[in-house]
């Protein structure tokens, strides 16, 4: 029953996380585009009123006229819309999922004894510290003298995230390391909203109500953090989907793959931001494409050695079926016996011979090529057993 409840909590948590995440990222992308697409106001009266830029757009059969003030309007409108709950609910649901999957079930998803033998409390504590200390370190960097020099700050931040990516991959399972890296970046993004952007906006509103001059520093700081957030977005989205692709987090150099694809994601975002400014240079896209293709080529499976042609895969199947029964069926069964699972992951059941043959390619990829399965090697599959599966698959992957 516990596994069934966890499945439902996972489903509902992911659903809500996806919905609010789309709302947050969509709003973020829109306002970055809006900010970078503003034109000088046409009306002198608008300029006199403090309007710094405007843009006309059409959508859904209607025309929209958006204006941005350099600091604040002469008078506050009666209704002022705030954008904050999209970010907050995305973080809350993301942390719920992280706690549900990677902390509550740390022995399955977070701890890999072959990487580092951690107890469950220590692993969870390290995960929490990564998220908290990541924000503190980032915030201190932005508030230091480096924060006044964006290029230097970006270089130091790059080194910082590289060290974090490498370090996490030395203590957690690959998928656990990736998710905590993404959780750290996501927390930084939300904390930027909660502790920098929103307080600044509140002070601007309060200044107008109190009749004092608004401090423009709030807009400067908010713009800096908003720009950082937009470049973090695609790396975080990659991490969100990465657990489905063991070829990345299951690789020996998973930390380097994580860094390369994070840079690729940031470069893609740079391209679109530059387009908003009217710069059509393809250089960021070229950099991203080279990184992605380079990673794909570097982690491609090596050519397999010739197999013994005198061996028929059917002769090996009995041994393979035994490996499935002892190492895989505890999860991949109609009624899993592994704690935390109510149904077979991805619906893949390996109890029957025909199912093993049907999923031969996936078994070979996950167990032999990426070595991502069994998760955290919970069932202690041996190298000899992986070799047996390899030979069986390469000789035909048949049962008879």
Image (cartoon, helix red, strand yellow):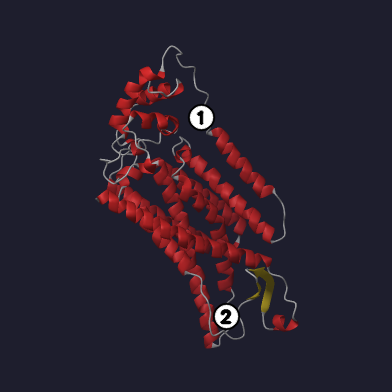
Name the front one of labels 2 and 1.
1
* Residue at image point 36% right, 19% down: 316
State the image coordinates of residue 282 (x, y, percent, origin top left).
70, 49
Residue 79: image tag: none
In the image, 396 versus 109, the foreground residue is: 396
In the image, 201 versus 100, the foreground residue is: 100
Q: Quadrant of the C terminus?
A: top left
State the image coordinates of residue 176 (x, y, percent, origin top left).
39, 46
* Residue at image point 63% right, 64% down: 33
Q: Which residue is mark 2?
A: 214
143 above or below 345? Answer: below
Looking at the rendered structure, the secondary structure element under dot 2 is: loop
Count of residue discs: 2
383 above or below 159? Answer: above
Looking at the rendered structure, the secondary structure element under dot 1 is: loop
132 above or below 69? Answer: above
Q: Dot 1: within a 10 Å radius of its alpha carbon, few (fewer than 14), some, or many (20 or more) residues?
A: few
State the image coordinates of residue 350 (x, y, percent, origin top left).
34, 34
Say left or right for 28 vs 67: left
Say left or right for 213 vs 330: right
Q: Dot 2: within a 10 Å radius of its alpha carbon, few (fewer than 14), some, or many (20 or more) residues?
A: some
State the image coordinates of residue 331 (x, y, percent, origin top left).
31, 39
Q: Which residue is mark 1?
A: 301
Q: CA distance from mark 2 to mark 1?
A: 59 Å
Which comes before the other along the chain, label 2 or label 1? Answer: 2
Q: Is residue 125 visible?
A: no
In the image, 337 versus 372, the foreground residue is: 337
In the image, 89 versus 218, the foreground residue is: 89
């Amino acid at each position: 029953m516990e596994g069934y409840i966890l499945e439902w909590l996972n489903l509902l948590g992911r659903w809500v996380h996806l919905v609010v995440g789309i709302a947050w990222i969509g709003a973020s992308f829109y306002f970055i585009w809006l900010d970078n697409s503003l034109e000088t106001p046409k009306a002198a009266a608008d300029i006199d009123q403090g309007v710094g830029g405007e843009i006309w757009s059409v959508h859904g059969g209607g025309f929209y006229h958006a204006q941005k003030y350099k600091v604040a309007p002469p008078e506050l409108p009666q209704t002022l819309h705030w954008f904050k709950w999209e970010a907050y609910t995305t973080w809350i649901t993301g942390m719920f999922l992280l706690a549900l999957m990677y902390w509550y079930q740390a022995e399955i998803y977070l701890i890999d004894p072959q990487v580092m033998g951690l107890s469950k409390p220590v692993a969870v504590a390290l995960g929490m510290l990564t998220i908290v200390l990541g924000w503190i370190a980032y915030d201190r960097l932005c508030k230091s003298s480096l924060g006044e020099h964006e290029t230097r700050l970006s270089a130091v931040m790059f080194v910082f995230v590289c060290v974090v990516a490498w370090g996490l991959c030395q203590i957690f399972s690959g998928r656990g390391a990736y998710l905590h890296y993404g959780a750290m970046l996501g927390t930084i993004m939300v904390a930027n909203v909660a502790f920098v952007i929103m307080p600044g906006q509140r002070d601007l509103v309060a200044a107008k109500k109190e009749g004092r001059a608004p401090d423009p520093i709030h807009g400067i700081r908010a713009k800096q953090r908003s720009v950082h957030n937009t470049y973090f977005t695609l790396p975080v989205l990659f991490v969100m989907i990465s657990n489905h692709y063991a070829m990345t987090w299951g690789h020996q150099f998973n930390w380097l793959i994580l860094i390369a694809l994070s840079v690729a994601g940031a470069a893609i975002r740079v391209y679109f931001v530059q387009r908003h400014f009217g710069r059509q240079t393809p250089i960021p896209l070229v950099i991203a494409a080279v990184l992605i293709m380079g990673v794909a080529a570097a982690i491609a499976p090596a050519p397999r050695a010739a197999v013994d042609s005198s061996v028929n895969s059917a002769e090996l199947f009995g041994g393979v079926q035994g490996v499935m029964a002892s190492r895989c069926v505890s999860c991949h069964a109609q009624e899993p016996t592994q704690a935390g699972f109510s149904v077979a992951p991805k619906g893949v059941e390996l109890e029957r011979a025909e199912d093993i043959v049907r999923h031969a390619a996936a078994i070979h990829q996950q167990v032999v090529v990426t070595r991502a399965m069994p998760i955290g090697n919970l069932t202690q599959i041996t190298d000899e057993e992986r070799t047996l599966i390899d030979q069986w698959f390469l000789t035909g992957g048949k049962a008879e």
